[in-house]
Every structure is written in structure tokens, then in C-alpha cells.
Image: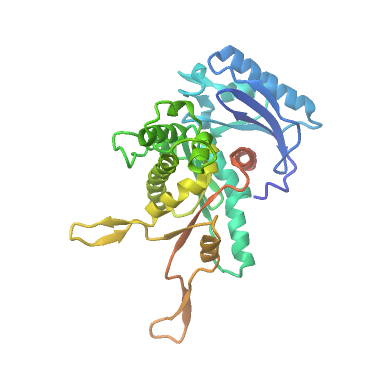
Amino acid sequence: MNLFEDKRVVMTLDAGGTNFVFSAIRGGENIVEPITLPSNGDNLEKSLANMVDGFSRVKDELNEEPAAISFAFPGPADYPNGIIGDLVNLPAYRGGVALGPFLKEKFNLPVYINNDGDLYAYGEALGGFLPEINKSLEDAGSPKRYHNLVGITLGTGLGGGLVREGKLIIGDNAMAAEIYAYRNKLNHNWCAEDGVSIRAVKRHYGEYSGDANAEELTPKDIFEIAKGMRPGNSEAAMKAFASVGDTLGDVLTHLATTFDGLIVIGGGLSGAAELIMPAALAEMNGTLDLPDGETMPRLVQKVVSADTEEGLSALLHQKTAEIKVPQSDKTVVYNPEPMLAVGISRIGASRAISLGAYAFALDKLDA
């Protein structure tokens, strides 16, 4: 699928707990000025009314009939049937709201709703990190190409999505890659999201610094403390982000073991990647202790950062060896050191989610 050459128009929505942002896409690009309305997440009638109003105003801006409506919602739901369930940021939808059928009836268009982590991964796979890395490999003269991708969003929560050879994997219950529920490495009684999120940064900084007002700080504040740009306990701030990286690295290790693909990270906390990712990579490239006193690597693959000169160079110039076929004069090329890369989104989570929503609609329309 080349979504940048498709001429169909799809109306989209960026649904958050505070605002709904409506737009329309053709050929992978927004073609109207975004329209922002309150989400009214605690009042279902007002929320639905604003949703109809937003899409109606976008439609009025178009010079042609849109092919579909496609957008993301945060959290698990019965997305194939368009039913939104219990969401933390939008409590009015708790108990089950048939949002897809409602919008289909209002606009007489196909309506596709998906988890934001899934659509983020899909957008990065078709129009972001994955094609960028493969283009760099091609330009470097490398025969290696990647076909699979894990997308991770870091912010208020921890989201994920999986794309295998151009197809989004959503699972039998539309709940694949709900990685927020992984076990937390640093506290096995907590979920991973409690260690890889905005609240985790605040909590860790409060624990390490003894600052009783840590909850009032933002991750940006704590980042600036770590960098010496703002008064505070710099060492504690650095340690707070490293702890987030440690927990994230454990999550990514489990993902890389289960699903062998490139990993791209987006969302608000990715802006602090320079303080988070060293610990995450150390965890992924770390070892496990065995009962006999020996150790083994946590991953078969070596993991490098696509955001450092050294890591990108290693990725683009992977080792190969030419080995003989037994009892033959023929030789074959062998990769003795399988490699994966982790990188921060170049296009941003919002753009990737929009591309993912557009691509998912086109895929469904062509099915």
C-alpha cells in the first residue's frame, strides 16, 4: 500500500480526554484546518453532539464525499464492532457505547475505530520509522531489510502496537499489544505502566529526592532539573528517568523476544529519550543469571539505538560472512549477529496515528 499516492479522503479524529481534534486526509496529508472541540468526556450526550458537529464541519470543508471515517481512541475496547467500553480519560463511555454504529448512521459512511497504540504503530510502519530505516539500509548498500515493527507510546499511559509485513495485528479480541499490563520489573505487584509513564517519573523523583512537592512538577520540569536548567536535585532527576528506562527496557525485551521487529517510540515522554534510553538499552543487551553460575544474554538479537551515530552505523553495516555449503562448491551469505534497532519517532505520535487511521481505512475499503 502506498498511502501517499491514494486520492481517497478519510475524515479523522484525534480523541483525547480534554479535546477532540477533527481533520481529513488525502494521500497521507491533512487537507483541512483541524477543528478542535471539547471532548466532554464526563457527559455522553455533549460528547456525542460535539463528535457529530466536528465531523459535520470537516465534511462541509471538503469538495468531495469522504470514503470513510477512521480514528483512534485510548485504551482497550471492542474496536471491530465500534463499541467503546471503560476508558479512564472518557468516563461517560463506560459500560459500552456503540460509537461506530452511531456515526455510521449519522454520516452514512464506513466507520473504523482503533486503539491509538495500534494506529501509531501502523503509521510508523507505513509512513515513518520502518520505511526510513529501510531506505537508509538501501542507501548504504546493505541487503538487509526489516518487515516488522513494534510501536510504543509513552506519556500518560504506556501503549503499543504490532505490524507484521504491512498488516496491523490486533488479535482476536482487538487487544494485542496491551503492554501496559505487563508486570513491572521494579515492583512485581504493579503493572508496567506504573513504571513507564508520566506518573512514574514524578513518583521516582519524589522518592529519590525527598521532594514532597514532586507531584506538582511536570516531566519537563524534572528533565530540566536533571540537565541543570532548573533548581532541584539533579542526581535524583537523572535516576528517576533511568528507572523509567530500566522498566521500559524490560518491557521491550519481552516484546523483542515475542515479536522480532524494529521498535519505535513516540509520545510526550519520548522527549526525554536521552535520559531514558541508555538504561533501556542496557537492560535489553543485559544478561540473566543461570542456576549453574553461568549467564546468558536476555536477547538473541543485539539491540542498537538508531538515534546515535554509533548505533545507526552498526545497523547500516551489519556483519556478514560467506560460508560454504557442505559437500558443495557453493557458498551462502550468513548473518552471524542478528540485530534490532530502537529509535525515537521522527514524525511524532499525532502524525503517525493519523497516518495509521488513514491507512487502516484504505486497507478495509480495499478488502
Question: Residue 30 versus residue 286: which sits nearer the camera?
Answer: 286
Vertical order, 141 against 10 (above or below): below
Residue at x 57%, y 27% (from the top left corner): 16
The image shows residue 348 at horizontal and vertical percentages of 61, 42
Left or right for 54, reference 333: right
Q: Which residue is at the front of the view, 23 or 170?
A: 23
Where is the C terminus found, in terms of image quarters? top right
Q: Name the one closer to the observer, 35 or 322.
A: 35
Q: Is residue 123 visible?
A: yes
How is the protein colored in the picture? Answer: rainbow
Q: Position of residue 316 (x, y in %)?
A: 55, 65
- Residue 174 visible to the viewer: no
- Using residue 252 as the reference point, say whether residue 315 is left or right of it: right
Name the residue at 38% across, 38% down.
Answer: 192
In the displayed image of the protein, which residue is found farthest to the front? Answer: 231
Where residue 18 appears, as percent x and y from the top left, is 58, 22
Residue at 55% of width from left, 55% of height from top? 307
Label total for image: 0
Name the residue at the left extreme: 292
Residue 319, percent across and down? 48, 71
Query: Left or right: where does residue 4 sit relative to residue 344?
Result: right
Above or below for 362 versus 213:
below
**As drawn, 143 above or below 240:** below
Left-right relation of 245 to 100: left
Residue at the limit of the structure toward the right, as seen here? 63
